[in-house]
Amino acid sequence: STGISEYRFKGTGFALFAMQDNDCKFEINIDGVTKTIDLKNNKQRECIFSIYGLENTDHIISIKVISGALCVDSIITKS
């Protein structure tokens, strides 16, 4: 879907999985640091973003779709 989604977790990292039927550009922000990602049509479930080595504490992830639509399948966290 389009728009902004926010997720909270406690741990040292996470991985974001999606399956896309179209191209999508989105921003992902973790604890105030933003990265822009261009995602191409992949037609299969895959990890589209991951980060590890974070401090083992509470974190906030926000995802803002810039163009296209993002269909998040799952988020896996590591504690």
Image: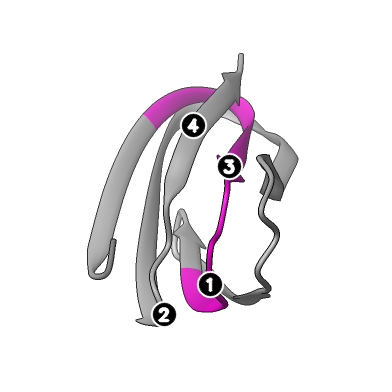
Q: Is 12 part of what is drawn in magenta?
A: yes
2 or 3: mark nearer the eye: 2
Residue 1, numbered circle: none
Q: Residue at x 35, y 70 (%)?
A: 64
Looking at the rendering, in which quadrant would you find the C terminus? top right
Determine contact: label 1, label 4, CB under 8 Å: no
Q: Main secondary structure of the magenta part?
A: strand
Q: Is residue 6 left or right of residue 14?
A: left
Quadrant of the image occupied by residue 76: top right
Q: Residues within 10 Å of mark 1 (few under 14, many from 20)?
A: some
Residue at which label 3 appears: 16
Determine contact: label 3, label 1, CB under 8 Å: no
Q: CA distance from mark 3 to mark 1?
A: 17 Å
Q: Earlier in the sequence, mark 1 or mark 4?
A: 1
- Residue 33's spot in the image, x, y percent? 53, 67
Say what amino acid the circle numbered 4 marks.
Answer: Ser
Q: Is residue 17 left or right of residue 72?
A: right
Determine contact: label 2, label 1, CB under 8 Å: yes
Q: CA distance from mark 4 to mark 3?
A: 6 Å
Residue 56 vertical position relative to residue 45 in the rendered view, above or below: above
Residue at which label 2 appears: 68
Q: CA distance from mark 4 to mark 2?
A: 19 Å
Residue at which label 1 appears: 22
Q: Which residues are magenta?
A: 9-27
Say what amino acid the circle numbered 3 marks.
Answer: Leu
Say what amino acid the circle numbered 1 marks.
Answer: Asn
2 or 1: mark nearer the eye: 1
